Image (cartoon, rainbow, N blue to C red):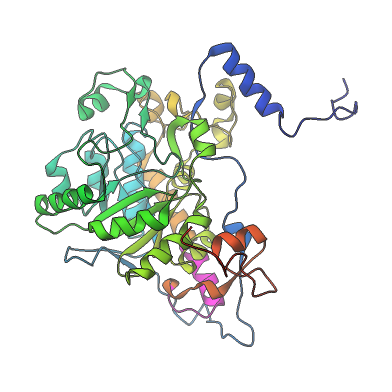
Amino acid sequence: MRSPEDRGLRESATFDRAAITAIQAAAATGVYDIRGWGAKRRVPHFDDLLFLGSSMSRYPLEGYRERCDTDVVLGDLHGAEPIHIKIPVTIAGMSFGALSAQAKEALGRGASKVGTATTTGDGGMTEEERGHSDKLIYQLLPSRYGMNPDHLRAADALEVVLGQGAKPGGGGMLLGQKISERVAEMRTLPAGIDQRSACRHPDWTGPDDLTIKINELREITDWTKPIFVKIGASRPYYDVKLAVAAGADVVVLDGMQGGTAATQEVFIEHVGIPILAALPQAVQALQELGMHRRVQLVASGGIRHGADVAKALAMGADAVSIGTAALIALGDNDPKYAEEYEKLGSAAGYYDDFQDGRDPAGITTQDPYLAARLDPVEAGDRLANYLRVLTLEAQTLARACGKSHLLNLEPEDMVSLTVEAAAMSRIPLAGTSWIPGAETRGAE
């Protein structure tokens, strides 16, 4: 049979096959789609920026003889014991519950091998994660599931989560098939029942209350732990200023390309803004407060390779954080499970049903049989290799720009390829000095 295209049929740009399938599913079931991963739509990203390597007017560094340092200190503003990481890439918060215990252990092992930090996520701290993470950031989320003062003290830093890039303004979600007995005990919930987290913290309604909460956390930990504040990218100019005013040592800014274990697809694809658009607003806010590089800025949401790392740092971030990429490095969507992905109605490289708990790779599951497939030592080694490559790639680009430290990268080392990217990033369009809207732009 000839294909529709061969027969001269045209697909609607508005009602394409994906839209038709979604409408038909909604009409048949009355249920909206929930999935994991992150936004799949094309949005302006770091690919729309290019570095200007050195030639005559700039002097490059020799990679085999001249150093390009990569270390970063996070959280040294308010007298706490800061985290000193060897590379400017951390592992984002992903909960035990969303991930298997083996996956959490692997993340800790991989991060520790290269001298960086990992983060707990919702639901508390596991022995596997703390035991294999040299540097562990403990997240305090609206749900307060698994919140334990002893764990606060056992962490190396605390992260107050106000939002995620995949769903700013929305709460967490962990479906019943992933609420095992152990997950339920940690979260003080019934096993097998869907868990939906609150979209905002229960004990404050604004920035002044956040100040009180940050001071409470400092008191619980004897003022020794840096306090991170994580925001989903939507109004970063104002949110960053308020976070700094509340006493944050570090601000984590998560763009809409950030992943999630499970949420409504309409949220993933239609809420928040890209990290490319969010970063300049956050940096502007810090600069106006005189706090840029004093309050560190960690960028996340769609970081894939060393070029993304270098570009985020050049735009003003102090470090980046990865989630989805880290899971892929562990073995998520591995082609060796191609047949099993097909049985689940998906394919290797396309699998996003993290909410179902049937992940053949043993990463986004609580099924003991599936989870046992993931060797945390081997997976940790893969993650460490990936993190080393990210760092080496970023160093290569920095040296080409004549920089002896990754944090010496700056916006003038880059140009934009599109008008949209130039307007969002505030980096001139290639071949020009033009930044669209630069003469009239306000805070947003």
Q: Residue furthest bottom?
A: 56
Residue furthest out toward the front = 440
- Is residue 117 visible in the rendered image? The answer is yes
Residue shown at 60%/30% (left/top)? 347
State yes or no: residue 378 in magenta: no
Q: What is the magenta range?
A: 391-405
The correct choice, above or below, for 350 with respect to 50 in the image is above
Quick check: 234 left or right of 342?
left
Q: Quadrant of the N terminus?
A: top right
Indicate the position of residue 338 as horizontal and vertical percent values: 58, 30
Magenta span: chief secondary structure: helix
Residue 250, located in which quarter of the rendered image?
A: bottom left
Residue furthest out toward the right: 7
Residue 400 placement: quadrant: bottom right
Compared to residue 239, the image places residue 342 above or below, namely: above
Asked if residue 321 can be seen in this view, the reply is: no
Q: Is 8 located above or below residue 38 in the figure?
A: above
Residue 107 vs residue 299, the one in the foreground: 299
Left or right: where 369 falls relative to 65 = left
**Could you say which is closer to the camera, residue 232 or residue 399?**
232
440 to the left or right of 354: right
Residue at the (50%, 17%) spot, across then down: 31
